[in-house]
Image (spheres, grey):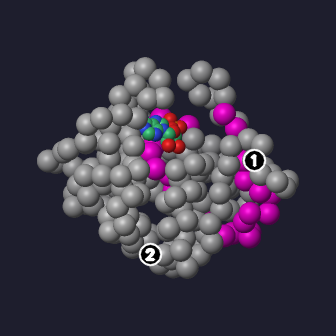
């Protein structure tokens, strides 16, 4: 494992925040499969001071009154979503992998490199017009995010923002999600 160091860290909340995130990411080569450089944000989650700063920064970026609910994508997105929701005094909605939710759910399937994945959200998760801030740890190709944003809107929520801690810029997720905007604290 090597730490991600960058002297010219960049992100949508400025270089200082980008550097802070970069200082708490570990690069894990060939996980979960050969050829993938896994961005492990557990060190950021484990550092109380940095985690709080990052979460407060996300709330400040969107404005404390800028969203009514926070949506987290399974599983690492749950960590970010719950903290942001708590900091802003709003609720949290989990978007889960297929078959995990106990009640009637909307579902959406999307293509992976090999095969397909399905995400679900409870049918009654959103009050009509509720402004949803969607969060996840990493934006890669954007397939997961695109499916989640569509799912939220299908379930009656209004997507007001999408934040990730780290964006793999070279994979084109941001372009895929356009014209929706992406807020990434660190872009590599
Ligand atoms: P994608 O749909 O390609 O944008 O992949 C995004 C989802 O997969 C997120 O939920 C991430 O947690 C996870 N992910 C994809 N690539 C990586 C990576 N290199 N490091 C860590 N997580 C990743």
68 or 72, which lies in front?
Answer: 72
The magenta span reads: 117-143
Identify the residue at horizontal 35%, vertical 52% (top origin).
Answer: 43
Of pointers 2 and 1, the one earlier in the residue sequence: 2
Q: Is residue 26 above or below residue 122?
A: above
Indicate left or right for 111 with 66 as reference: right
Question: Would you say the residues marked 2 and 1 are in contact, meaning their CB atoms lie under 8 Å apart?
Answer: no
User: Is residue 129 within the magenta segment?
Assistant: yes
> Under 8 Å from ligand 1: the CB of mark 2?
no
103 or 1, which lies in front?
Answer: 1
Q: Is residue 108 above or below residue 31?
A: below
Tell me if residue 176 can be seen: no
User: What residue is disc 1 on?
Assistant: 100
Assess disc 1: are there few (<14), some (14-19) or many (≥20) residues with their C-alpha within 10 Å of its C-alpha. few
> Under 8 Å from ligand 1: the CB of mark 1?
no
**Residue 167 on image: x %, y %:** 38, 44
User: What residue is disc 2 on?
Assistant: 63
Q: Residue furthest right?
A: 104
**Residue 126 on image: x %, y %:** 72, 65
Residue 89: which quarter of the image?
A: bottom right
């Amino acid at each position: 494992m090597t730490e991600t160091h960058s002297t010219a860290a960049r992100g949508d909340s400025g270089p200082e925040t980008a550097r802070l995130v970069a200082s708490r990411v570990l690069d894990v080569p060939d996980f979960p499969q050969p050829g993938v450089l896994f961005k492990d944000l557990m060190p950021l989650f484990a550092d109380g001071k940095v985690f709080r700063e990052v979460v407060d920064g996300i709330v400040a970026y969107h404005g404390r009154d800028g969203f009514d609910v926070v949506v987290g994508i399974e599983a690492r997105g749950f960590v970010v979503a719950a903290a942001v929701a708590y900091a802003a005094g709003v609720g949290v909605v989990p978007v889960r992998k297929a078959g995990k939710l106990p009640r009637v759910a909307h579902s959406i399937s999307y293509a992976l490199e090999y095969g397909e994945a399905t995400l679900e959200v409870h049918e009654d998760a959103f009050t009509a017009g509720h402004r949803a801030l969607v969060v996840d740890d990493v934006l890669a190709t954007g397939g997961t995010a695109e499916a989640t944003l569509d799912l939220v809107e299908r379930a009656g929520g209004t997507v007001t923002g999408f934040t990730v801690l780290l964006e793999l810029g070279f994979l084109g997720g941001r372009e895929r999600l356009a014209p929706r905007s992406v807020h990434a604290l660190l872009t590599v």
